[in-house]
Amino acid sequence: MRTELAIFRAQTRAWLQDHCPLAMRTRMVPGEEVNGGTKKRSSNPDAYIWLENMAARGWTAPTWPKEYGGAGLDTDHFMVLLEELQQLGARPPLGGMGISMIGPTLLEYGSEEQKRRHLPAIANGQYAWCQGYSEPGAGSDLAGLQTYAEDCGDHFLVSGSKVWTSGASHADWMFCLVRTDRDAPKHDGISFLLFSMDSPGVTVQPIELINGQSPFCQTFLDEVHVAKEDLVHKLNQGWTVGKRLLQHERSGLAALASADMAGPMERIKPSVSMSELFTNYGVRPDDLDAALRDDLIGNDMLITAFRLTQLRTLQTSASETPGAATSIFKLVEANYVKEQLELQLRIRGTQGLGWEGSSFTDEEISMCRLWLEAKSISIAGGSNEIQLNIIAKRVLGLPD
């Protein structure tokens, strides 16, 4: 087996050297990422060469079965691929909710027809996906959602609204939690549906944030026709599917398949490393006060431990996402990313507070807006308080 793995490593290394464009071996630049679909294109043409090359080998979703667009790699081969991608400094060829969230969920809960229809299209970047979970009246209490799907025989008619639907303005498909039984206990009357964002009755309204960007939207659904074959799993049992999808999101393990060491927080990862920051500002670590040095070291140690834990989880779980323990990943990562941005601000001083103006560089303005945006990550995807409750009840087994 070791000899076979050594051969696979050599072949993988050679192939990556020949097929990964040089521009894809640098730090990700905002606007150059590929999350699937054609409504929002990468500004770097090489990103699509990289996507096409990786998708042809099934390496956008390495552990998925070959018949669904993956490569069917076992854990040992997957780890070799991961290590070689990271050694090369390769960017993720494909991101988004298709690869990291709905794809793995369909592998577990989707029908054979749903898998064959959607998974290859996800793996080759054909479609972009968005998530229809939160509503204006159902955020942290997600099970209180009121978007209703009326059973009309061979189809549903879905009406209601979803909010904070990331990327809805350029998504092709939505996976959505809806109420299908108003009389059942709230967790028991929910179903999990898929539908095209081009369906009649779907209206998307972007939400502008404090940083001037609009990654989130409110999505209005007015009698949207959803075929019965787009019901995932069983009627009124969508809460089980929805929870499992969140575990995939919170684990960050799917992102590792593309050498993305930041996991699901890639969008708000600081755009420069601490070492680059010292160089840019002419600061030496010895120039910093002891408290700041200690905080920098502590944050770096936490990030390193977090990444090692993710890799160990992959090695011991045969690439399957763990259960409630994913809340630990979500909690720790949200906290260390926020702390890292605070540390960058402390090093920059007042230059880290630039919103606009000629006295600030583009990078400083970008980092200021990232710093503000990062305040939301301890809420988005399930607040820290929710993660702590899950850890207490489901991981530690503490009483209510």
Image (spheres, rainbow, N blue to C red):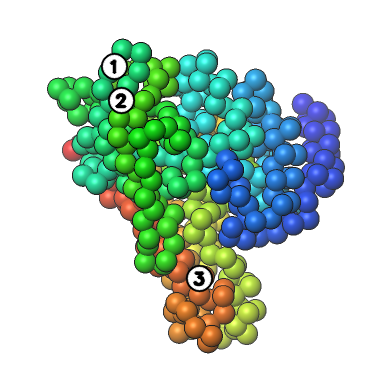
* Above-or-below relation of 323 to 336: above
Towards the viewer: 22 or 117: 117
Towards the viewer: 163 or 142: 163
**Residue 13 visible, this orientation:** no
How far apart marks 2 and 3 lie (CA) works out to: 43 Å
Which mark is first along the chain, 1 or 2? 1
Looking at the image, how many numbered discs can be counted on the residues? Answer: 3
Which quadrant of the structure image shows residue 143?
top left
Q: Which residue is mark 3?
A: 367
* Above-or-below relation of 348 to 78: below
Please tell me the numbered disc located at residue 108: none
How far apart marks 2 and 1 lie (CA) works out to: 7 Å
Which mark is first along the chain, 3 or 1? 1
**Contact (CB < 8 A) between labels 2 and 1?**
yes
Q: Which residue is mark 1?
A: 152
Which mark is first along the chain, 3 or 2? 2
Tag nearer the camera, 1 or 3: 1
